Amino acid sequence: MTGQEQVELLHGLVAIPSLSGGEGDAVAYLVERMRSLGLDVRIDEVGNAVGTVGSGERHVVLLGHIDTVPGVVPVGVADGVLTGRGSVDAKGPLATFVCAAAMAAERLNCRVTVVGAVGEETMGSLGATAVAEWPAPDLCIIGEPSGWDGLCLGYRGSLSATYRLVQASRHTAGPGEAAAEQVIAFWNALVAAVADRNGEATGFNAIAPSVRDMGTRHDGMSDEAWIGVGLRLPPGLDVAWLRETLDRLAAPGELTVHGMQEGYRSDKRTPLVPPFLRAIRAAGGEPRFTVKLGTSDMSVVGPRWRCPILAYGPGDAALDHTPEERIVLAEYLNAVTVLASVLEAL
C-alpha cells in the first residue's frame, strides 16, 4: 500500500459516524476495504469486523475498536493533520492494524486476525467480550493511541454506578436532611473512603472517583435525588472491599452498579516487545513504555487469554473524547511501518 492509500483508508473510516450501538456502516466499510486488500473477512455475531491474513501455527490478534463517543468533530485534512471524531480513539490505531497486516501479508509466517470491535466505549465492551470467548491467541496487540513510538503495558479498570435516594417531601425549614443533601453526603463519604484506601498511591496505582451526572426531582409527595459516579480501578484492587464499601455507604439509599471492569497490567518481558523496540528505532524513534489512567479492551481479553499483550497505535491520548481530536498523518504512517515490521518479525 502507498502512503496515500493508507491515508485514504483512515480518512474514509473517520468520515463514517460510528457511535457505540450504531457502527454498522463503518463496519461494512472496513470489511470491504479489508477484502480489497486480500484479507479473508466476515462480520461476527455481535457485529465486529474481522479480517484474517497469513498462515502458520502462531496466531496474532490485532484487537482495535471501531465505535466512538458522541460529538461531531469536522472531518478534514490540513497541514498534514487529519481531524475527526475517532481519528485518535481509536480509528487511527485500527486503520494502522489493517494497513500493516496488508503490507506484511506476503512475508508473514503467522496468522494475523484484525478485529474492528463494536461497543468498546460502553460498559461491558460488547465486541471484545465476544472475542474473549475465542481460543487464546499466541500474541495480542490492542489498538489504542500510545504514540507511534510508545508501547502501553496497562490500563486501569472502571466501575459505573448510580446512587439514588427517595423520601417523603419535606419543607426546607423542617427537620432532617433533604434528599439532595444526603446524596452529596454519600459522595463525600465515598471520596473519603477512597482516599483512605489509596494511602500513598497515586496515578495508575490509585482509585480515582468522578461524578458523571446528578439531579433531583419533586412531585409534591416525594423528593428524589441521584448521582452517577465512576471509579477508575488499579490492577489488583480488592473487589470484595470495594463492593462492601459501596454497600455500606449506600444506606439509606439505593446503589445500582451498571458494570465493572478490573484493571490489567502486562509484562514487558514478552516476545512482543523486542521486535517493537527494533522497529521503532529503525524508524527513527526512541521507544518508551507507558501505562494509562483510562480503560481499554486489554482489561477484557487479557485476564481471559493470559497471552503476551500490549497496546499500540498512533495518536495523542490526551485528545481522546475532546473537540480537538486529530492525528498527525506522518505519525500514523510511521506506526504502519513499525507494525508491519513487527508482524514480519513475528
Image (tube, helix red, strand yellow):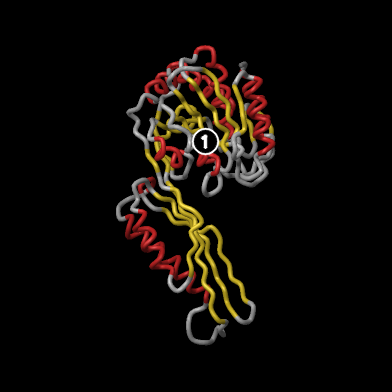
Any part of residue 326 in sight: no
Residue at image x 64%, y 22%? 35
Front-lying residue, 275 or 76: 275
The residue lying toward the viewer, choosing from 310 and 132, is 132
Residue 245 x, y percent position in the rendering: 37, 63
Q: Where does the C terminus fall, quadrant-wise? A: top left
Q: In the image, what residue occupies the spot 52% across and 36% down?
A: 316
Residue 321 occupies quadrant: top right
**37 or 216: nearer the viewer:** 37
Where 128 falls versus 94 (above or below)? below
Horizontal and vertical percent for residue 336? 54, 22
Q: Where 117 falls versus 193 (above or below)?
A: above
| Extreme-bottom residue of the structure | 174
Tell me the quadrant of the picture where the N terminus can be found: top right
Instruction: Say what amino acid the circle numbered 1 marks.
Output: Asp
Q: How many marks overall?
A: 1
Outermost residue to the left: 200
> What's the residue at 43%, 72% (across, down)?
251
Percent x, y of residue 47: 61, 38
Left or right position of 207 against 178: left
Q: Secondary structure at mark 1?
A: loop
Q: Which residue is denoted by mark 1 in the rendering?
A: 316
Q: Is residue 121 visible?
A: yes
Q: Residues within 10 Å of mark 1 (few under 14, many from 20)?
A: some
Where residue 213 sits: x, y (%)? 56, 60
Residue found at the far top of this picture: 106
